[in-house]
Amino acid sequence: MRQASGVMVTDEVIAVFNDMKVRKAQANEDEKRKRKKAILFRISNDLKNIVLDDGKEILLDDCRYALYDATYETKETKKEDLVFIFWAPDNAPLKSKMIYASSKDAIKRKFEGIKHEWQVNGLEDLKDRHTLAEKLGGSSVVSLEGAPI
């Protein structure tokens, strides 16, 4: 099914998402250590598909989507949630920002059950744990990735 920008989400992307979601639900401690904390996705060069990004690092000069497996604690309980991240750095080309922004709903629709979305415009944002904690549960979050907020 083509979305507004005409971009399709590949089966591989959906499979990776489902894998992250399922493992989250039934992982023991050993499996938790093995699984990926974050996965990057990009729009293919022909602008037709959203695909897995083989790169291991986010770029400062282009947009990406990411899934991040956040582990955090509220005053009551320990939680894990998948966070959808739209990485749109300030110095990415305007055309790229527009294509990624208009294609975002296509990938989000495939990622059923994601409660949190975070648009990040630079590394400072990414390092700001308070912003992420706020997105995950507001003032009730007391720790993120094992470290106090």
Image (cartoon, helix red, strand yellow):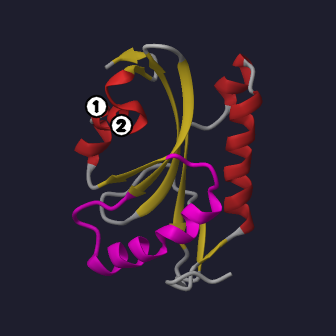
Question: Which residue is drawn at the image coordinates 44% and 19% (left, top)?
Answer: 74
Could you give the CA–CA distance between mark 2 and mark 1, rounded to whole angstroms? Answer: 5 Å
Provide the residue designation for mark 2.
132
Please tell me whether residue 126 is drawn above or below residue 9 in the rendered image. Answer: above
Question: Which residue is drawn at the image coordinates 54% and 18% (left, top)?
Answer: 78
- Residues 40 and 74: in front is 74
- In the rendered image, which quarter is residue 27 located in? top right
For residue 139, side relative to residue 112 (left or right)? left
For residue 100, side relative to residue 138 (left or right)? right
Q: How packed is label 2: few (under 14 Cα within 10 Å), some, or many (20 or more)?
A: many
| Element on which disc 2 rests | helix
Please tell me whether residue 141 is drawn above or below residue 114 in the rendered image. Answer: above
Q: Which residues are magenta?
A: 87-115
Q: Position of residue 36 (x, y in %)?
A: 61, 38
Provide the residue designation for mark 1.
130
- Residues 63 and 140: in front is 140
Q: Position of residue 49 (x, y in %)?
A: 60, 77
Please tell me whether residue 25 is drawn above or below residue 15 in the rendered image. Answer: above
Asked if disc 2 and disc 1 are in contact, CB closer than 8 Å, the reply is yes
Q: Position of residue 58 (x, y in %)?
A: 41, 53
- Does the magenta-highlighted stretch encompass residue 93? yes
Q: How packed is label 1: few (under 14 Cα within 10 Å), some, or many (20 or more)?
A: some
Question: Which amino acid is tagged 1?
Answer: His
Question: Which amino acid is tagged 2?
Answer: Leu
- In the picture, which quadrant includes the N terminus? bottom right
